[in-house]
Amino acid sequence: MVIRKQNVMVAFVLVAAIVAPASTDAWKQFRSPKGFSVMYPGTWFEIGRSPDRLQLLSSAHGAEGIVIKRGQAEVVVLEASELSAKTLAQVIDYYTQRATVLSRRNISERDRGSCGNLQEVVSKEPAVPPKDVPTYVRVPYIINTDLFCEVGGRKIVVLLRNWEGDKRQAQYQWVALRMAKSIRILQ
């Protein structure tokens, strides 16, 4: 009886370690000179940084021409100020215009200084134009989980990309949502 309980406990600990998202104590802060900040996993790899943009990969090295390789995700955080879009709905339309929308949801946050209006849109799009793929080859798809944040009249976007069918998609989406919830406007 004792052996069974120990085996169950060991199995539970192993499963919890496998499915638990990355530890939050390994997160870093990106502070944009444009006046916003976002927390991101310190274990992810920075592949681009500018005053209004942070670009990360979940693991080292990407795939030539597409950026992400199989089993990898990319997150880009940026302010959508360069767009002529004035409303959050217009920003969402801009970023989803060439994709097939799979789901939408509104995530309300009430923390002071955080995104009071946070929208999640999950969509998919072909990784390459279907016309460029022979008819006997299945077109590969990218899943986009885009989080649109409006705080203080500013629109910050968290764009997550991963391959369709990636077993870690839920974990990547958790990371992207955690990042979006951490967005703050700096005074």
Image (cartoon, helix red, strand yellow):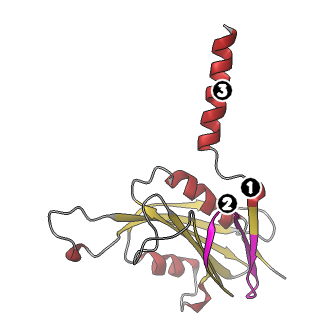
- Which of marks 3 and 1 precedes in the sequence? 3
Task: Estimate the x, y position of residue 66 in percent, counting from the top left.
Answer: 41, 74
Density class for disc 1 (Cα within 10 Å; few <14, some 14-19, many ≥20) is few
Tag 1 secondary structure: helix
Looking at this rendering, what residue extends furthest in the right direction?
187
Q: Can residue 143 be seen by looking at this rendering?
A: yes
For the magenta stretch, what is the residue range?
29-47
- Between the residue at mark 3 and the residue at mark 2, the CA separation in whole angstroms equals 29 Å
Give yes or no for residue 36 being in the magenta stretch. yes
Asked if residue 12 is positioned above or below residue 74 in the image, the reply reads above
Name the kind of residue labelled 2 in the image. Answer: Arg
Please report the residue visible at 70 percent of the width from the left and 69 percent of the height from the top: 115
Question: Which residue in the structure is indicated by mark 1?
Answer: 24
| Of 55 and 143, the residue lying toward us | 55
For residue 118, what is the image quadrant? Answer: bottom right
Decide whether the magenta segment is chiefly helix, strand or loop: strand
Marking on residue 67: none
- Label 1 vs label 3, nearer the camera: 3
- In this rendering, the label closer to the viewer, 1 or 2: 1
Which residue is under mark 2?
A: 178
Q: Secondary structure at mark 2?
A: helix
Residue position marked by numbered label 3 in the rendering: 10
Instruction: State if disc 2 and disc 1 touch (CB < 8 Å).
Output: yes
* Residue 53 position in % (x across, y down): 63, 82
User: Of the residues tagged 3 and 2, which is closer to the observer?
Assistant: 3
- Quick one: label 3 or label 2, which is nearer the N terminus? 3
